[in-house]
Amino acid sequence: MKLISISAAVFLIILTATCNSTSGNNNSMEVTGTIEAIQMTSWQYGTHTISNDSTFYALRSDKADLGQFEGQTVTIKASKIEGYPVDGGPEFLEVEEVQE
């Protein structure tokens, strides 16, 4: 089990290091990918993730119900939350808007 956790953490770090996004500044960005609910993780933040072939982020939102977009490919407008990643997890984004 420990080997699986370590392997998953390494995979997420590598995936996060190669992520690309478009942004108007360093904190604001748009990401297109599939939204999924977070299940069991080694990192303890966010309610959902967004991922595609090159990006993987943890998400939270006070403005959008991310649950209604689970399993869908969407574009989000979001900003990075300072102080993350932690515990080997991904960058953490605050979602401002979801576009189908």
Image (spheres, rainbow, N blue to C red):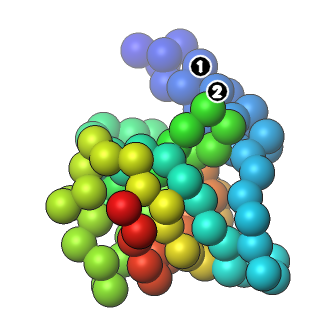
The kind of residue on which mark 2 rests is Phe
In terms of image quadrants, where is residue 53? top right
* SS category of the residue bearing label 1: helix
> Measured from the top left, where is residue 81 in percent x and y?
60, 76
State the residue position of label 2: 11
Residue 83 in sight from this viewpoint: no
State the residue position of label 1: 7
Q: Which mark is residue 15?
A: none
> Measured from the top left, where is residue 35 in percent x and y?
37, 50
> Measured from the top left, where is residue 77 in percent x and y?
54, 74
The kind of residue on which mark 1 rests is Ser
Q: Is residue 32 left or right of residue 67?
A: right
Who is closer to the viewer here, 25 or 74? 74
Q: Is residue 49 left or right of residue 87?
A: left
> Measured from the top left, where is residue 76 in percent x and y?
49, 67
Please tell me how crowded label 1 is: few (under 14), some (14-19), or many (20+) other residues with Cα within 10 Å: few
Q: Residue at x 67, y 37 (%)?
A: 54
Examine the rendered structure and indicate whether residue 59 appears above or below residue 18. Answer: below
Please tell me how crowded label 2 is: few (under 14), some (14-19), or many (20+) other residues with Cα within 10 Å: some
Callouts 1 and 2 close, C-beta under 8 Å: yes
Q: Residue at x 44, y 63 (%)?
A: 59
Residue 40 in sight from this viewpoint: yes
Quadrant of the snapshot with the N terminus:
top left
Residue found at the very far left of the displayed protein: 68
From the image, state whether disc 1 or disc 2 is nearer to you. 2
